[in-house]
Image (tube, helix red, strand yellow):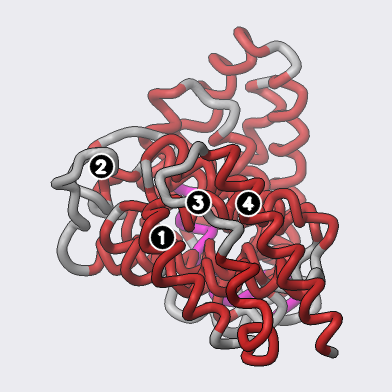
C-alpha cells in the first residue's frame, strides 16, 4: 500500500510546490485524480484499524502540510473553475477521512493546521454556485473533525474558526441545506471547546464570557442555535436536532440560567416558541417545543407566572378581556415540580388556542 500510494503523494507534493501556477483545468484534474486514489487507499486501510492507522500515519503525516498548501488555493479558485471546485471537495473529503482515521497524536497536529487553512481564506461569498453547498458541508465536516482535538494549540484558533463557520452559515442564501452539518460544528464546539469562550464551568455562578471576540462569538453561536429551533425552512428532523442540542446544554451545563444567555437570548426564544405552540403550526415537533418552553420558563417560575404570562396575553386582547381569569387560574403559586409545570403549560397553551378559535 505504501508503495502504491507513493506516486499519488508525490503528485500532490509536486502540485504543492507549484501551487501558484495552478491555473488550468489539467493541473486541478491531476490533483483530483490523485486525491481520489488516496481516499480509496484510506477507506481500504480503515477496514483494518490497528495496522491501518499505523500505515496511514507513515504515508500521510509527512504529506499533510502539502495537502493543506493545496487546499487554500483550490478553495479560493473554486468559483472560477469547476475543476478547482471538484478538487477542493475531494481534498476536504480526504482531510476529513484522515482526521477520523489517523492516530490521535497526528490528528492533534493536523487540527490546528486545518483551522489555520480555513480561517485565513480571503473570500467565501462566491461559494453559492450549483455545488457550493457541497463545498461548505465539506468545510463544516473538517471543522467538526478538527475541533474534537483537545490541545493548547487550538485555543487561540477556535474562536476564529467558530466565527468563520457562523459567518459562512449566516451568509449562505439557503441555510437549510447546510443546517445539519453546521449544527455538528456547534455541538462539537460546545462540548469540546467551551473553555475557549467561557472562563469556567457554566454551572459556576461566577462564570463569565471570555472578553473580546471569543465571548461575542459564543453569543453569535447561541443566536444561530436559537434561530434553528424556529426556522420554518428547516426540515422537522433538523429542527428537532437543534432543540435537542439546546436542551442538552441546559441539562448538562445550565445554559439557560447563564446570565448572558438569560438576558439576550431567553426572552425572545421563549416568545417565539410559545407563539409557535399557540398557533399549533408545528405539530410534529410540538412535544419537543413544549419541553423546551418548560425549561426556558422554569429558569424563574415565579417571574414567568406573575410577570411574563400577563404580558404574553396582551398580544391577544380579545381573549384577555373575557378569559384572563380562567387562564391565570390554571397556575398554582410557584415553585412547581417540572412535570406539574409542563402539564399546566400544555393546558394553558391548549386553552388559549381554544379561546382564540372561539373568538375568531
Q: Residues within 10 Å of mark 1 (few under 14, many from 20)?
A: many
Residue designated by label 1:
162
| Count of marks, rendered view | 4
Front tag of 1 and 4 = 4
Name the quadrant containing residue 238: bottom right
Quadrant in which the C terminus appears: bottom right
Q: State the mark number for residue 153.
A: 2
Task: Tell me if residue 145 can be seen.
Answer: yes
Secondary structure of residue under mark 2: helix
Give whichever of 139, 336 is nearer the camera.
Answer: 336
Name the quadrant containing residue 98: top right
Residue 284: image location, x then y, percent = 84, 56
Specify which label sits upstream in the sequence, 1 or 2.
2
Specify which label sits upstream in the sequence, 1 or 4.
1
Residue designated by label 3:
332
Residue designated by label 4:
344
Q: CA distance from mark 2 to mark 4?
A: 49 Å
The magenta span reads 65-84
Name the quadrant containing residue 95: top right
Amino acid at each position: 500500500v505504501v508503495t502504491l500510494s507513493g506516486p499519488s503523494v508525490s503528485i500532490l507534493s509536486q502540485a504543492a510546490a507549484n501551487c501558484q501556477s495552478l491555473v488550468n483545468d489539467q493541473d486541478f484534474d491531476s490533483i483530483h485524480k490523485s486525491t481520489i486514489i488516496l481516499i480509496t487507499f484510506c477507506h481500504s486501510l480503515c477496514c483494518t484499524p490497528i495496522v491501518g492507522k499505523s500505515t496511514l500515519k507513515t504515508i500521510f503525516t509527512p504529506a499533510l502540510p502539502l495537502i493543506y498548501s493545496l487546499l487554500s488555493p483550490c478553495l479560493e479558485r473554486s468559483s472560477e473553475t469547476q475543476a478547482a471546485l471538484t478538487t477542493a471537495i475531494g481534498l476536504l473529503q480526504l482531510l476529513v477521512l484522515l482526521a477520523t482515521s489517523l492516530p490521535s497524536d497526528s490528528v492533534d497536529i493536523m487540527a490546528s493546521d486545518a483551522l489555520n487553512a480555513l480561517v485565513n481564506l480571503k473570500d467565501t461569498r462566491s461559494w453559492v454556485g450549483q455545488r457550493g453547498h457541497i463545498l461548505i458541508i465539506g468545510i463544516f465536516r473538517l471543522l467538526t473533525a478538527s475541533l474534537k482535538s483537545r490541545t493548547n494549540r487550538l485555543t487561540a484558533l477556535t474562536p476564529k474558526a467558530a466565527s468563520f463557520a457562523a459567518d459562512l452559515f449566516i451568509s449562505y442564501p439557503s441555510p437549510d441545506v447546510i443546517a445539519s452539518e453546521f449544527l455538528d460544528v456547534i455541538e462539537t464546539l460546545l462540548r469540546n471547546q467551551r473553555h475557549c469562550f467561557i472562563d469556567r464551568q457554566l454551572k459556576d455562578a461566577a462564570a463569565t464570557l471570555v472578553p473580546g471576540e471569543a465571548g461575542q462569538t459564543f453569543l453569535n453561536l447561541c443566536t444561530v442555535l436559537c434561530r434553528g429551533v424556529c426556522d420554518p425552512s428547516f426540515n422537522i428532523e433538523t429542527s428537532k436536532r437543534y432543540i435537542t442540542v439546546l436542551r442538552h446544554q441546559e441539562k448538562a451545563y445550565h445554559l439557560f440560567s447563564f446570565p448572558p444567555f438569560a438576558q439576550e437570548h431567553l426572552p425572545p426564544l421563549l416568545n417565539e416558541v410559545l407563539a409557535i405552540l399557540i398557533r399549533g403550526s408545528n405539530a410534529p415537533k410540538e412535544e419537543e417545543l413544549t419541553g423546551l418552553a418548560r425549561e426556558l420558563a422554569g429558569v424563574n417560575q415565579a417571574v414567568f407566572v406573575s410577570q411574563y404570562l400577563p404580558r404574553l396575553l396582551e398580544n391577544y386582547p380579545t381573549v384577555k378581556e373575557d378569559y384572563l381569569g380562567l387562564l391565570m387560574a390554571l397556575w398554582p403559586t410557584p415553585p412547581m415540580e417540572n412535570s406539574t409545570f409542563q402539564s399546566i403549560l400544555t393546558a394553558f397553551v391548549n386553552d388559549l388556542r381554544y379561546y382564540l378559535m372561539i373568538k375568531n
